[in-house]
Amino acid sequence: MTLSIRNQLPGTVTEVHPGEVMATVKVRLDGGGELTAAVTREAVEQLVLAPGSPVRALVKSTEVSLATSRVEGLSIRNQFAGTITQLSTGEAMASVKVTMEAGQLTAVITRDAADDLGLFVGSDVIALIKATEVSLATA
C-alpha cells in the first residue's frame, strides 16, 4: 500500500496500555527516541500489537507543530529535537523538513508561523506531535 503520509518512522512497540476504548502504545524508534501513540483498543487487537511488534508510526505533515525550544507544561507527549534541513515557503503555507535522531519529519505550517518563529535552514527546532495524531501500521 502506498500512502500520502510523508512521515513514516519505523520502530518497535515497547509497551501497550489498554483502556476501555483507547490504548497508549509506546514505540522505540529505530533511529533513536521514544514515541507515544494513542489508538483505539480495537486497533491494538486487530494489529496484534504487543511488546516486540515492529511498526511504522505515521503522522500527517499538517499534524506536526514546531517550536524554537523545548516546551514545558504541555500535554503533547512527543517532542523531538532536530535541525531544519529544508524550508519551502509559499504565499500561505511553509513546508519544513526536520532532521532528528529518529529520522526525518516534515511539518506543514502557515507561512506566518514560519516567519514569526524566524525559521531558516540550519535552525534548531522541536517537533511536537500529539499522541492522538499518531497512527500505527504493521508490515
Image (tube, helix red, strand yellow):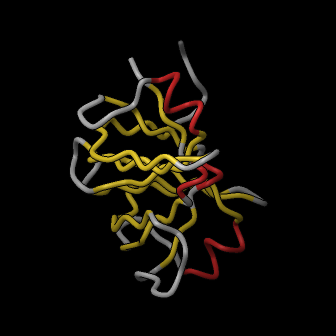
Quadrant hosting residue 99: bottom left
Q: Residue furthest bottom?
A: 73
Instruction: Tell me if residue 103 can be seen.
Output: no
Residue at the image point whose x is 42% and y is 83% from the top: 69
Image-based side of 89 in relation to 91, left or right:
left
In this image, 63 relative to 34: left or right?
right
The answer to whether 1 is drawn above or below residue 61 in the figure is above
Outermost right residue? 92
Q: Is residue 64 visible?
A: yes
On the image, the x and y values in percent for residue 91 come to 77, 59
- Decide which of 60, 45 is in the foreground and name it: 45
| Location of residue 8 with respect to 26 vertically, above or below | above
- Where does residue 90 sit, x and y in percent of width and height? 71, 56
Tell me the quarter of the image containing the C terminus: top left
44 to 73, vertically: above or below: above
At 64% from the left and 45% from the top, the residue drawn is 21
Q: Report the label total.
A: 0
Q: Position of residue 65 (x, y in %)?
A: 57, 65
Residue in the image at 41% along x and 65% along y: 121
Image location of residue 64, percent across then percent down: 56, 57
Q: Nearer the viewer, residue 22 or 66?
A: 22
**73, 95: nearer the viewer:** 73
For image coordinates 52% across by 22% down, the residue present is 46
Q: Residue furthest top?
A: 1
